[in-house]
Image (tube, rainbow, N blue to C red):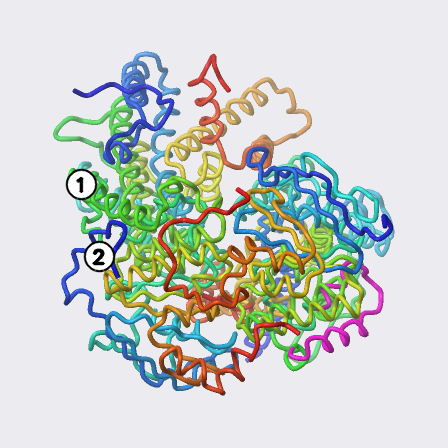
Amino acid sequence: MNFFMQLLVNGICVGFLYGISAMGFVMIFKSSSVLNFAHGELIAIGAFLFLVLVTWAQLPIALSFFITLAGCFALGFIVERLFLRPLIGEPLIFVIMLTVGLAAMFKGLILLIFGGNLHTYPRFLPASLGIDYGPVNIPPVYVATLIIGITFLVLFGLFFKYSSQGIYMRSVADNQRAALSLGVHVRRVFALSWAIAALVAGMSGIVLGIINGINVHDLSSIGLKVFPVVILGGLDSIGGAIIGGIIIGLLETFTGGYISPSLRDVVPYIVLVFILMVKPYGLFGLVEIERV
Amino acid sequence: MKKLRFHPCGNFRDHYKQELAIFETDFGRLMLWIGIGLLFAAVPTLSSPYTLYVVNTVGITSIAAIGLNILVGYTGQISLGHGAFFGVGAYAAAILATSANVPFLIAVPAAGLITAMVGMIFGIPSGRLKGLYLTIATLAGQFIIEYTIIHWESLTMGTRGITLPEASLLGIRVRGDLGFFYVIFILLIAMTWIAVNIMRTRYGRAFIAIRDNDRAAEGMGIPIFQYKLLSFGISSFYAGIAGAIWAYYMISVTAEPFNLMLSVEYIAMIIIGGLGNIPGAILGATFITLLNELLRWFTGILINTNLFAGLGLNMAPLREFVFGLTIVLFILFEPRGLAEIWRILRSSFRLWPFSY
Amino acid sequence: MKSLRGQPSIFAGRKPGEVRADLDARNLTLRFGGVTALDGVDLQVRTGELLAVIGPNGAGKTSLLNCITGYYKAQQGAVAFNGVDITNRTTHELVRVGIGRTFQNIELFPGMTVLSNMLLARHTHCSYGLGAASLFLGAVREEEIRHRRVLEELIDFLEMQAIRKKTVGSLPYGMMKRVELGRALALEPKLLVLDEPFAGMNLEEKEDMVRFLLEMNGAWGQTMILVEHDMSIVMSIAQRVVVLNFGEKLAEGTPEQVRSEPEVIKAYLGDTETVL
Amino acid sequence: MEDNILLQINNISVVYSDVIQVLKGVSLTVEKNHIVSLLGSNGSGKTTTLKAISGLLKPENGKVTDGTILYSGEPIQNQSPETITRAGIIQVLEGRQPFKYLTIEENLRVGTATRWGKPYRQDIDLVYRYFPALLARRKSLAGYCSGGELQMLVMGRALMAHPELLLLDEPSLGLAPLVVKEIFRIIKRINEEQGTTIVLVEQNANMALQIAHTGYVMENGKIVMEGRALDLIENPDIKEFYLGMAASGDSRSYRDVKSYRRRKRWL
């Protein structure tokens, strides 16, 4: 029973982490319908930027954190400007393939600079943040993850539902031509969504780095883990990303704990395919409205 | 009497039959035959074993890329599982040849059919899923197949791999790079011709219709799901044939090469070559294969000269970086791919020196 | 009515049994998104008839067509065509049965030429298999040429000779509507379902379209269902009119009967032609 | 007199993809607070003219290659749509392009994009006053609304931007007769009550000329006729080719259409 409880808690924590990692991905999809294959690399860039600031530049943690977020925000902006803007109006598969190319570029670049070894941050989270309640044992970092995750979830939820800028972003994803005709600054919306997405990715990079250490290969493979998560939740639902993340997290830990560790990475995909066959737009995705 | 027609300066066709021809002019047909003749005459005499190996890789990759282009470029179903299907073909041939002693001539098409079946099974979600949701389902297919290949040890020998017997064709042993060169390229020509034929008949038209507007396609009496499955089947058949030949050529198969990266490379090939363009798939396959070899050669030189050894640089990341950069540049500057560049070049040559 | 142009042979060669198109839809009910689009609608079409369906926007006209052509599945009710139950058939099966349609918002393939668009409609009339196609056997070539002849006759009938090789996306709106009609005809439908074929056309284009419809109906006995808002057209060419409102049948009868129905005037027509 | 002119198009040519010429020297003048109707057959370049004004040519690879478009005296040809919409020109696209996954009210809020951050509550109420049908459905997704509701929605959405010049592209396309009348009545009211200048592209020439002050007729990318709407209604060519039997009053029926093509007198 204790084993079960611990698996359950672990699964939820890991899942939450996936969910947060996936949020940035959903941002981009929501505004421009682009599947970002370079998301894992954006996460890695955030983690490494933080590493550089904390260990090499020896800046205070809080300052490093904010500089990292600002840097990622700027990076997202630049990436959109340089690589994605010229493709506005081209078929989606080109944009998607472009992110595949970007992923390879970024990964190669990070490997060239930092190599493939494992790096770690110094410990800085207070131990008092952890929860130790009977059989349930949640380390501080997961508690921090939960707090950050819920904060961002609420913020994004409110942003997209109520703020004008959020509604403009959704309108661009819905019908670009109509948005343009009403004076929505479509290019600015794209730039903004990439910038915010990179910011969220950078943040999840830091969290992942604290938990697992920083390794390019591991971090960029999170970018692939994000796919079943967001598809499960529905590509355009931020809340769905969190729930999808938790489902995948639970699936992984329980398969790893009760069946076989080698099945860990495949089972989520198998379950995913079956769920999609029943609900083709994920659990919370918008069903395409078709009028004949 | 049949008149030889070179380039037309107007529409002079006097029969519908002429509009069905692949080549607008006899000149085009002539050039193609000359090109093929030159290829078969020149390649064996000129090449070192290494260049022959590269040429053969190009041929095998082209077959698989044509298959993927039928699925992605023509039918519009983006698949990230082509690398795995290639692997299924390779393993199917290897298992048939070793456990059942099936001869080369039968093992290759059988592997193609087996892969087609597997491809159709993984294509079933296309009945319900649209666009990117389907893409992710094929990604799931990629991982599931990879996992199966590694963990179904009784069939695939797991990580140890399988060694294939020597290929023989009607009693003649297919040996060495040159032997395979003939097999691969005759097969490539046949498979290209078949693909062109499929695309210019009702099957190809149905595929394109599904890609462009599935509701209207349905209204034209095209059963969408069956045709999507058919497209998955044909596409995997090509991948399976290519994989089978590759297995025989490489003599042994292991699971590592058939990873997601290979699937991504195939997508890169057809995008760089030109989506929905059969010669484009060949051009793209050639380009990516040559790029890979060039980068390998280049990093080899760097390592040998010890130029950067002091910096502790690993060369694999550099290769990855350049690979990514090439894709990015291609998409930014010529999203319609090599086929389009080729078309522009050709039309400016055809009218030379009187262009415009 | 006398035919003035050549009649396409696929229609000229039809025997009386082959034009039979009796549609009988009973009690069709369709709900989606919390809205009842159709509420127990009955619809009968007889062979050789030109039936118009009119009604306000959102009255369920297109939903009705979609139920008949298989795009939507009605939750209740049954549809029979020539005595055969076709209630749950899919769209592509219905095309084989002989029900062809055009769409309200043009659903052509904009990147293809007019000919390729129409060639798609010959799909169900191709008899060769995948093996023959992949080798492009002589029989395949001959069949393709035969289809091309059929299309040329249709192009001739619809006066589209000048645009047959043009990309559909580059054509003006009214021409696209005509291409869509041509494509639907290439299906050789027994029952042709037209969803607002005159929308967005000017007078001249409308007159051309009317000529084609009248000739198809008069000279070949083509059965048609027509959804249209232009009352002057509906009233002058339809033999029978069905009026829908809020998913229910409001009235049915000859154009004259329907036009004088007070309910119809109130819900749909309005009383004057002027704005103010 | 000059002060009265809001928009002045001088002899513009428009080319798509550097090769296809659609407009060949179009000139027209729009006076303040007027409704101008643009008639003409399909493919004659009416929509292109609107797009040239609103800057929406650019995303479609089109360009004004010749001539000028003066808006309040300032040249605006080939400007980006963001700039032009902020100057007060809003186009309502042909074929009703709602944001399908946004609710009616969210759709309306997108209309505030040109003046982001300013209060908009009052404007929404104003739109609901013009289009009461929208109020009842304010929380439902636009994707599930009927054609008439959508047309009201896209017009209301444009009103949210406080346009000085409103470009309407085929507002009556595919609408029931009763709704068409309603829409035209509202267009006229908006013009009178809000003082909005309107350029109206329409196939329904009868309705369009009834509410317009001036009218232009386009053919093959050129203006072939212009004049006061009252005069155009009486013009025999307009009567024959655009108004048909509806306005001429005779009982000529579509059943009698002749099989030969009549020629327009001005061609």
Q: Is residue B164 above or below residue A18?
A: above
Residue A225 image position (x, y, % from top left): 55, 57
Q: The residue under label 1 is which amino acid type?
A: Glu
Q: Is residue B241 visible?
A: yes
Q: Which mark is residue C4?
A: none
Q: CA distance from mark 1 to mark 2?
A: 21 Å
**Mark 1 or mark 2: whose residue is earlier in sequence:** 2
Residue A118: x and y in percent read 65, 46
Q: Which residue is mark 2?
A: C11
Q: Is residue D173 left or right of residue D35?
A: left
Q: Is residue C86 above or below residue A19?
A: below
- The kind of residue tagged 2 is Phe
Q: Is residue D129 shown above or below B277? A: below
**Which residue is denoted by mark 1 in the rendering?**
C142
Q: Is residue B162 above or below residue A159?
A: above
Front residue of C22 and A161: C22
Q: Can you tell which of label 1 and label 2 is closer to the viewer?
A: 2
| Place of residue C81 in the rendered image (x, y in percent of width and height, measured from the top left) | 24, 74
**Is residue A24 visible from the viewing direction of this image?**
no
In the picture, measured across the screen, residue D115 lies left or right of residue B48, that is: right
